[in-house]
Image: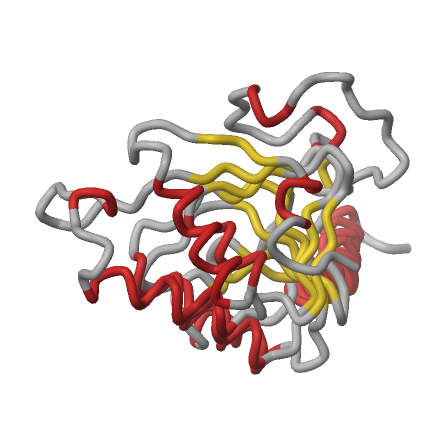
Amino acid sequence: MVSPTALARTLIVAALAAVLAFAPAQAQQVVTVTTTTVTWTYEDVDADVGNGADQADDFATAPDEDAPTEDTDLAATRRYAPSATLATVGRARASFGPFAVIDDTTIRMAGDVTSATPRQFAAMLAAFPNLKRLEMVDCPGSLDEEANLILARAIRRAGMETVVPSGGSVRSGAVELWLAGITRRAAPDAEFGVHSWLDDTGHQANDYPASDPVHAEYLSYYREMGMDDTKARAFYALTNSTPFDDVRYLTRDDMARFVTLN
């Protein structure tokens, strides 16, 4: 006959054995969940590639090419954000500054160009070398004009197609980025906002005489992107006809007067 003390000891040992037997399985379950999360969160190596190489959990994307357009004169309408057709939230594979990698060939852009953006673009191409399509969703322009032109030429060297989808908006220096595409596309309701540049002394383009070398950089860039001299000068004059603190909106058809659209 087993004494009550021995029976109690046996029960305690059995209980401890059961706990110990269960603990490794429970611990293994936690490790598995953690590993899955890390794998799903793109690659940590991106954080070491350059500024802005962060995971984009949510990104305002999914332009609807078939979405109806409004019967409004976009050239006379001030709109500083993309239309509601672009409000669908999607998941990007990775983000690099204003760029979000959607798949192996497509990136979407939303945000300003800064001094860091060319490095972020280069890091993105190093991580995703097959990227060929740049969808410009909501691009206000540039906070660093030198960096903007460096980025534009990098887009051209990469052989990118630049696209403004339905409801998309590119303004100011972002228009130069769109011009950099090897092929260029724009939805019928795509929006292009232009205005004069402003230098660090507070002077605008028209404050300088036409013969001033300050104009050469833009004229050279437009010719580099495929405009002949006459069109380059006409487009440059058009952009500078609107003061820096204002904006003139152009349509897809307006842009087609100066460059070929595909």
Q: How is the image coloured?
A: secondary structure
Residue at 37% over, 50% down? 142
**Is any part of residue 120 visible from this angle?**
yes
Q: Is residue 10 above or below residue 61?
A: below
Residue at 41% over, 72% down? 119
- In the picture, the quarter occupied by the N terminus is bottom right
Left or right side of 37 for 227: left
Q: Nearer the viewer, residue 158 or 175?
A: 175
Among the 4 quarters of the image, the one containing residue 31: bottom right
- Residue 197 in the image: x percent, y percent? 29, 46
- Residue 97 in the image: x percent, y percent? 47, 57
- In the picture, the quarter occupied by the C terminus is bottom right
- Residue 199 in the image: x percent, y percent? 18, 50
Residue at 45% over, 76% down? 49
Among the 4 quarters of the image, the one containing residue 202: top left
Left or right side of 204 for 135: right
**Is any part of residue 27 visible from this angle?**
no
